[in-house]
Image (spheres, grey):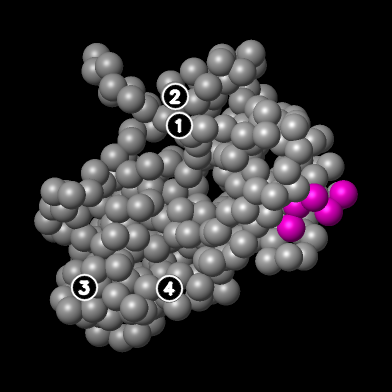
Amino acid sequence: MFTYRITETDHCRRVENLLCNLLPAAPHGYLKQLAKTGHLKVNGSPTSLEALLRLEDTVTLKESVRTRHFLAGDRPRLDILYEDQWLMVFNKEPGLPMHRAAEVDERNLVDLGMKLMAERGGEGKLRPINRLDRGTSGVVMLGKSSASAAMFGQMLQEEGLDKMYLGVVGGKPAAPAGSISAPLEGKEAETRFRVLFQGKGIAFVAIWPVTGRMHQIRQHFRIIGHPIRGDKRYGGGTLPEYPGHLLHSFRTTFVHPSNGNRLTLHAPLPSGFVAQLRAMAGDMLAPLLRELPDL
């Protein structure tokens, strides 16, 4: 029996997503078979591929020659949260740009994703459906073709994305929850938030952007005097030990335009972000993380 204990790295990851990381060469049909036959269990009970894993859960896989063959020594370079014939959804690492900057040859999500597709024998060109700033981590969606990008782009215009971010801000917000309404570039903008933990001079917050203006969350928290930690552009200073700023797109919900199904995806926090939270919250970290899926 192969046994895995869920740590912060996989907290809030879907079972299917974990298996794709552990068994990257396995066909999707084989993963479905593991669940259907009961060879895959969470905390001793059969589970589905859509189930959400939580901190300290125990995942077991029945040992077999085929499963052992598919096991990877290392996890894939890119953290794919979801994939189908239309799109790939990544958990973008902090500090990684979406595109290559002009005349600068650097790592970027689109090129890395294209390289991965080519290695697997796939064709097509990845096109961002939504975007995250270089320093922001978390859920980002890329279409596998111009047709899929257009289909999801229309969904984005008509339905939008239901998103929740997690962030660490400076100081102590005036209220444990609230709404920031301040126009940006002449357009109405609103951001709602809730303080999850108040540390010494910093706060861990859940954030719901009601509108989608450029740099909205970062600008709004600067406006109220509590900038995102590590966001030097908007007054949050620098974090030498962290490659971005402490803002993470944690949960995204959308209606898949190909079938009308409602899909919710969570992106586990980067290890460096977790380290910052551990320094702030200490023994309260585990309870804080366990609360996140229910917000």
10 Å crowding of disc 3: few (<14), some (14-19), many (20+): some
In the image, 151 versus 2, the foreground residue is 2
Q: Which residue is mark 3?
A: 202
Q: Residues within 10 Å of mark 4 (few under 14, many from 20)?
A: some
Range of the magenta residues?
A: 37-41
Residue hosting label 2: 112
Of label 4 and label 2, which has the lower sequence position? 2
Q: What secondary structure is marked by label 1?
A: loop
Give the mark nearer the N terminus: 1 vs 3: 1
Label 1 vs label 2: CA separation?
9 Å
Q: Is 254 rendered above or below residue 63?
A: below
Picture layout, residue 20 above or below residue 201: above
Q: Is residue 148 above or below residue 60?
A: above
The residue labelled by disc 4 is: 286
* Marks 3 and 4, the one that precedes in the sequence: 3
Residue 77 disc label: 1
Label whose residue precedes the other's in the sequence (4 or 1): 1
Q: Residue furthest bottom?
A: 175
Q: Would residue 30 appear left or right of 249 to someone viewing this image? A: right
What amino acid is found at the position of numbered circle 4 in the picture?
Answer: Ala
Residue at image x 36%, y 79%?
Answer: 284
Q: Amino acid at mark 1?
A: Arg
Mark 3 in CB contact with mark 2 (< 8 angstroms): no
**Furthest residue to the right?**
37
Residue 40 forms part of the magenta stretch? yes
